[in-house]
Each structure stands twice: as structure tokens, then as C-alpha cells.
Amino acid sequence: MSRFLIFGLILATCSIAFASDPSPLQDFCVADPKSPVLVNGLVCKDPKLVQADDFLFRGLNIMGNTTNAVGSNVTAVNVAQLPGLNTLGISMVRIDFAPMGINAPHTHPRATEILTLIEGRLLVGFVTSNPENRLISKVLEEGDVFVFPQGLIHFQQNIGHGNAIAIAALSSQNPGVITIADAVFGSNPDIVGDILAKAFQVDINVVYQIQSKF
């Protein structure tokens, strides 16, 4: 085996090993959003200036406004809302659902999600990658926990008669979210209609109609 191949395998192994938020090298690294320095993540605030409020978020007990097209609201607690999460590799969300509301199919490019149903009844699921595209789905009752692997498209729907509440933890301080419909039909600028018509095997006018909603 050549030295170049061995070197390549080492690099690949290291890439896999570090394919997540970096581990902290000190007790904490509270984010300094005012810093002009650009890094992969956020610059640390001077530890001498850190206060207890840097580690505190209030308001997760408040119901989000679900009066919208999908009937749900996500209250995020990531490094943008809680600077003390910087470098800690974790965040969370509260998801509120109106009756029949959905958290539309989406993906988190940088995090696995583990969801706990607090109130109500949810249909949840995720789809595996090509070529299988297998749907793995389950109905959750209060107290149930379900995990969505990193990067896979997943969704939730309230199938109960009242509101539903879920709390989810994510394995990144900044998990990111790509809502499939928004990304495909609401991109800026628009994806060429002919591309989407062929991808979804529909008439191009159907594509234009859907794009007009975004």
C-alpha cells in the first residue's frame, strides 16, 4: 500500500472522527456575537466578562403562535439565543402544534434530533437515503421518545384532537434546518421550472403555481 493511500485513509478517518461540533478545550466558550472575527462557529467572550445570564434562556414554557399555514411553531434555543451553548455541541427546541398541524418535512444538516412528546399525539417519521427511500414512521403518545438521524428528512403531524407539545434536543449548537418545500419551491432566485417539472414529473404550470405560494 502506497504512502499516499495510507495518508488518504488517515485523513478520511480523521474527517469522520471530527464530523461534529468540536469538543471544548476549556470550561466554556460563551459566544461573542459582536466580534468582527469570522470563525467556524463563534468567537469566545472574555471569560472575565461572562455572566450567569449567558447560560440562561427564559420562555420555553410559553406556547408558540401556531396560526400559520402549517399549524405549528418552533421555538429554538441554540447558540443564537443562548450564547453559553457555544462549543458545547447541543441545543433544543419546543414545537407547538395546532390540531392537525405539521412540522413540515425538513432536515438538520448538522445534528441528530431526539424528540419527547409532552402533550398530545403525533405521527412522526423519517425517510432513509437513496435508493431505498424507506419511510420509518410511528405514532407517539405522551412521554414517548423518537430519534431522527442526522441529515435525514423527517416530519411530525398532530393527529390528536387538541394541541400538542414536543421538546427536542439536537446534537449541535447550530443544527441548521432546511425545510424541503421552502428550499425547493421558495429558493431565491427560483429553481428553473423545467428542472422541477422533470424532477417531480408534473406539468410545468403546476410548478409555477406551487412556487407562487412561496
Image (tube, rainbow, N blue to C red):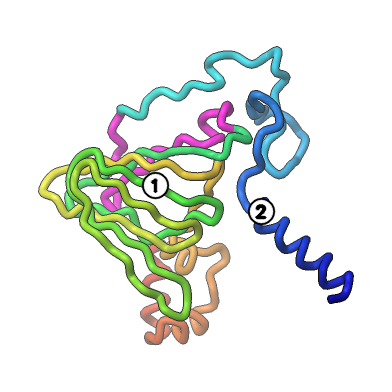
Under circle 2, the secondary element is: helix
Under circle 1, the secondary element is: strand
Along the line of sight, which residue is nearer the eye, 108 or 65? Answer: 108
Residue 79 is covered by the magenta coloring? yes
The amino acid sitting under disc 2 is: Ala
Along the line of sight, which residue is nearer the eye, 15 or 100? Answer: 15
Magenta highlight range: 62-85
Q: CA distance from mark 2 to mark 1?
A: 21 Å
Residue 114: give x, y in percent of width and height.
Answer: 39, 47
Report the disc number at residue 114. 1
Quadrant holding the N terminus: bottom right
Residue 67 is covered by the magenta coloring? yes
Report if the CB atoms under discs 2 and 1 are less than 8 Å apart. no
Neighbours of disc 1 within 10 Å: few (<14), some (14-19), many (20+): some
Task: Characterize the magenta stretch by its predominant secondary structure.
Answer: loop
The residue lying at 45 percent from left, 68 percent from top is 185
Quadrant holding the C terminus: bottom left
Q: Disc 2 vs disc 1: which is toward the camera?
A: 2
The residue lying at 52 percent from left, 29 percent from top is 82
The amino acid sitting under disc 1 is: Ile
**Left or right, residue 99 beside residue 64:** left
Pick out the residue farthest to the front: 1
- Circle 2 is placed at which residue position? 17
